[in-house]
C-alpha cells in the first residue's frame, strides 16, 4: 500500500464496509464487539490517522479553538496555554493563540474568525468585549465562548476565575500583620473589573484594620512594567511615602522594585513589595517576590473543559467557576524598620 492509509484500506483488509470502519473510529457506539476491536487494531497496525480536512467538510467543524490574550509577550499566559492545550489535545482539538495587543479591532477580528467557522470556540482573556456600536447585540446567544480569569460582567458567557477580592485582601493583611500601616496600592487599568476587584480587596483589608488610605496611595497602572516604575516614583516623592506597596500584578512589581533600587531603597528593608500572579520569574527574582499564585494550568484545563461541554450541547453554567489562590510569602516582605 502506498501513500497515507485510508478508511477504505482498513475496510478491505477486514472485509467490512467503509461505513462500518468510519463509525467504529468515530466511536459512535454503533459497532459491536469483536468488530470494533478488530477495526481499531487494524487502524493501529496501518498507522491510520484521520484526515481532519475531510472530516471538517462533513462535520462543519474546524477542530480548533482560539485562546485570545491581551499581550502574547506576557509569560503569565504560558501555563494557561499549557492547560488549555492538554485538555484540547486529549479531545482532538488544536489551539490557536490570538494576540489582542489591547486593540479592540483585533478582538473584533477574532470574534469574526469564530463566527466564520475558522475556530469552533474561543477562550477569551482580554477582560473586555470590543466596544464597537451594537457589537454585543450581534453576538449569538449560543456562541461557544468561555471567559477565563478576566471578568466581563455584562457578558453572558461562562467564566472560570479566582476570587480577586479575597486574594488581594489576604496579600494586604500579610503586610498589616508584619506591622505596616502606610500601605499603597498600584492597580491595573480601572475600570476593568479585575482591577477594581483587586483594589476592593486592598481597601477592605485597610478599612478592617482601621487604616487610612490617602488619595495619593492609590496609583493606577496598566499591568506593564513601566507603569509599575512610574507609579512607584510618584509614591516615593510623597511627603510621607509608603513602607509597603501591593501591586495588581508581578510585572508591575518588578518595575516598582527596579525603581526602588534605582532610588537607593532596599527591598524589603525600606519598602516591602507584594505582587499578584506568581510568574515563573518571581521565584528567580532577587529577592524572590512575595505574590499571589493562581492555578494557571488548571484554569486553562477547566476553561477548555467548559468549551467541550458546550460543543457537546451542554448548558453553560450560570455561576462562574471559582478556583483557589495561594499567597506565596518570599523575600520582598518584612516588618517596617520602625516597628
Image: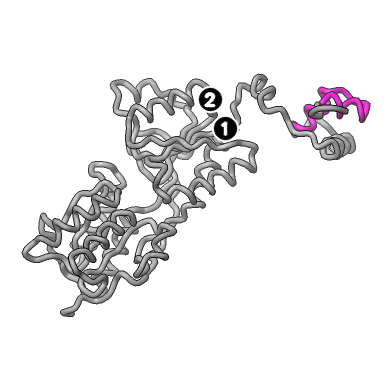
Residue 159, image x, y percentages: 43, 42
Magenta span main SS: helix
Would residue 173 be seen by someone viewing this image from the given angle? yes
Q: Within 10 angstroms of label 2, few (less than 14), some, or many (20 or more) residues?
A: some
Label 1 vs 2, first from the N-terminus: 1
Q: Quadrant of the C terminus?
A: bottom left
Please provide the residue range marked out in magenta: 7-27
User: Which residue: 12% across, 65% down?
Assistant: 241
Q: Is residue 13 magenta?
A: yes
For marks 1 and 2, give the CA distance.
Answer: 8 Å
Q: Residue furthest left?
A: 239
Evaluate if marks 1 and 2 touch, with contact meaning CB atoms under 8 Å apart: yes
Which residue lies under the disc numbered 2? 118
In the drawing, does residue 325 fall left or right of residue 21? Answer: left
Give above or below for 194 relative to 269. above
Would residue 319 be seen by someone viewing this image from the given angle? no
User: Which residue: 41% across, 48% down?
Assistant: 161
Residue 81, image x, y percentages: 50, 45
Which residue lies under the disc numbered 1? 64
Q: Is residue 94 magenta?
A: no
Residue 278, image x, y percentages: 40, 59
User: Which residue: 11% across, 55% down?
Assistant: 215
Amino acid at each position: 500500500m502506498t501513500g497515507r492509509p485510508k478508511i477504505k484500506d482498513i475496510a478491505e483488509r477486514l472485509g467490512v464496509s467503509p461505513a462500518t470502519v468510519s463509525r467504529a473510529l468515530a466511536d459512535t457506539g454503533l459497532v459491536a464487539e469483536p468488530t470494533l476491536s478488530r477495526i481499531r487494531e487494524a487502524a493501529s497496525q496501518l498507522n491510520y490517522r484521520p484526515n481532519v480536512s475531510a472530516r471538517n467538510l462533513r462535520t462543519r467543524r474546524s477542530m480548533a479553538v482560539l485562546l485570545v490574550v491581551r499581550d502574547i509577550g506576557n509569560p503569565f499566559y504560558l501555563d494557561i496555554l499549557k492547560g488549555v492545550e492538554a485538555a484540547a489535545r486529549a479531545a482532538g482539538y488544536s489551539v490557536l493563540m490570538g494576540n489582542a495587543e489591547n486593540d479592540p479591532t483585533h478582538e473584533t477580528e477574532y470574534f469574526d474568525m469564530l463566527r466564520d467557522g475558522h475556530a469552533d470556540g474561543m477562550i477569551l482573556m482580554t477582560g473586555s468585549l470590543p466596544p464597537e456600536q451594537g457589537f454585543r447585540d450581534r453576538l449569538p446567544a449560543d456562541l461557544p465562548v468561555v471567559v477565563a480569569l478576566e471578568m466581563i460582567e455584562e457578558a453572558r458567557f461562562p467564566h472560570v476565575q479566582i476570587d480577586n477580592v479575597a486574594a488581594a485582601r489576604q496579600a494586604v493583611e500579610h503586610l498589616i500583620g508584619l506591622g505596616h500601616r502606610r500601605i499603597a496600592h498600584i492597580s491595573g487599568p480601572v475600570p476593568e473589573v479585575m482591577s477594581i476587584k483587586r483594589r476592593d480587596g486592598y481597601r477592605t483589608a485597610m478599612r478592617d484594620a482601621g487604616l487610612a488610605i490617602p488619595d495619593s496611595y492609590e496609583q493606577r497602572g496598566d499591568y506593564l512594567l513601566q507603569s509599575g516604575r512610574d507609579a512607584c516614583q510618584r509614591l516615593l516623592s510623597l511627603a510621607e511615602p509608603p513602607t509597603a506597596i501591593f501591586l495588581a500584578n508581578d510585572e508591575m512589581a518588578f518595575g516598582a522594585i527596579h525603581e526602588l533600587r534605582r532610588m537607593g531603597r532596599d527591598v524589603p528593608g525600606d519598602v516591602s513589595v507584594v505582587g499578584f500572579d506568581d510568574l515563573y520569574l518571581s521565584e528567580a527574582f532577587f529577592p524572590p517576590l512575595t505574590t499571589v499564585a493562581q492555578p494557571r494550568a488548571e484554569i486553562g484545563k477547566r476553561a477548555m473543559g467548559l468549551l467541550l461541554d458546550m460543543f457537546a450541547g451542554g448548558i453553560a453554567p450560570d455561576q462562574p467557576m471559582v478556583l483557589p489562590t495561594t499567597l506565596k510569602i518570599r523575600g520582598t516582605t518584612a516588618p517596617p524598620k520602625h516597628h
